[in-house]
Image (cartoon, rainbow, N blue to C red):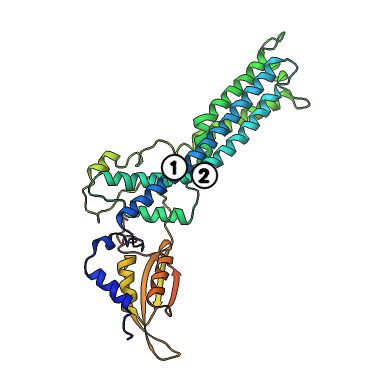
Amino acid sequence: MPEPTPEQNQRRQSMESGDERQAVWTFRGYHLDPGNLTTSLVHLYRGEVSRANMWRQRLDSTTNWAVISTGAAFSLVFSSVLVSHAIILLTNLLVTLFLYIEARRYRYYELWSTRIRLLETDFYAAMLVPPFAPAADWSETLADNLLHPTFTISMWEAVGRRLRRNYLWIYAILELAWVFNLILRPGVNLTWQRFVQEAAIGGIPGHIVVIANAVFYLGVVLVALFTRGLHEATGEVLPRYAAGQASMGDALASAGRQLDEPEQPAWFRPHKRRQQLLAQIITDHPEAVAERLLHDLSRGVTRLDGTGMYTGKSSPVLLCAVTVTEVAHLKALVAEEDPAAFVIVTPAQEILGKGFGSLSQDA
């Protein structure tokens, strides 16, 4: 077996000496002290808040467009009897376009807002209540969100939330304006037949216009109602836990629990399981590589004895289960210890055990 290099000996001596300052911040492989970690997270938080505020302003801009369009339609229709009430119906379509644009912007806003909430609930809140105990998967979730940004809410939820917050009122005002424009015309006796006749637009019969208008507003109300149960957004002022789960007060009261006890997940935390992988490492320095994976990556390592069929040489094989965000770190550690190592990373259907899923049937 080759002799360890001076760098490997120095690293091993540092680990064995119990250097707490180094041990604290090898969590992600960066040899930084806790102060640098806190400073980095503070700057990340400030950056994400700034980006979320920018997108929040863009949401307000889209709402302003809808309000201005509604006011312009009122001015045109009620200022002259020559202007057709179809302007109001066309304004409905324009407002719907603004709703779609705002919902799309809201999804981007939620992407940054999710990161902010993860830092607030699992770093800052945990820091204020001893012992400092963030959720077991919060840093992995945040890292996965940074490496692979994906929308945290669906388009339907975004449309439903913006609809219930602002656009239902705009639609209601437009509908009332359309009705009053038809029934308050001078010299017109108010009857249902007369109302339907006045609703006609060009060659489109009035009853077709009335039915299309009713179907449109029924669809708007149904979207607002059926998306009410979608509850993945974090940008609203909402508690960390969903109704029926533990409250924030209960969570803080149990802050002194053992760190290995199950953690009540935050309702907004992405429920998608991060990709799990199995790394197979064929190396001539199994002890050095395993030591780095155990201490720097905090993952278990299993050694198997293998034989190269071409050379007939005994070649130890190390097995290490990791998540997708840890692959780059694993490859860097292996390359430092043995640049000639052979590494195979394969997807795993499911990994159960400490640090991954639970073996219990009710998990």
Q: Which residue corresponds to mark 2?
A: 108
Q: Amino acid at mark 1?
A: Val
Looking at the image, the residue that sits furthest to the top is 187
Up-down relation of residue 214 to residue 348 (above or below) = above
Q: Indicate the position of residue 344 as horizontal and vertical percent values.
A: 44, 74
Q: Secondary structure at mark 2?
A: helix
For disc 2, the neighbor class at 10 Å (few under 14, some 14 to 19, many from 20) is some
Amino acid found under the numbered disc labelled 2? Tyr
CA separation in Å, label 1 and label 2: 13 Å
Left or right: residue 147 compared with residue 285: right
Q: Is residue 322 above or below residue 196?
A: below
Query: In the rendering, which numbered label is found on residue 49?
Result: 1
Residue drawn at x 33%, y 48% as measured from the top left? 123
Instruction: Locate the N terminus and report the quarter of the image it occupies.
Output: bottom left
Q: Position of residue 52 (x, y in %)?
A: 47, 41
Helix, strand or loop status at disc 1: helix
Image: 220 above or below 32: above
Q: For this view, does 66 lie left or right of residue 363?
A: right
Q: Which mark is residue 97?
A: none
Asked if residue 105 lies left or right of residue 90, the reply is left
- Can residue 15 be seen here? yes
Quadrant of the image containing the C terminus: bottom left
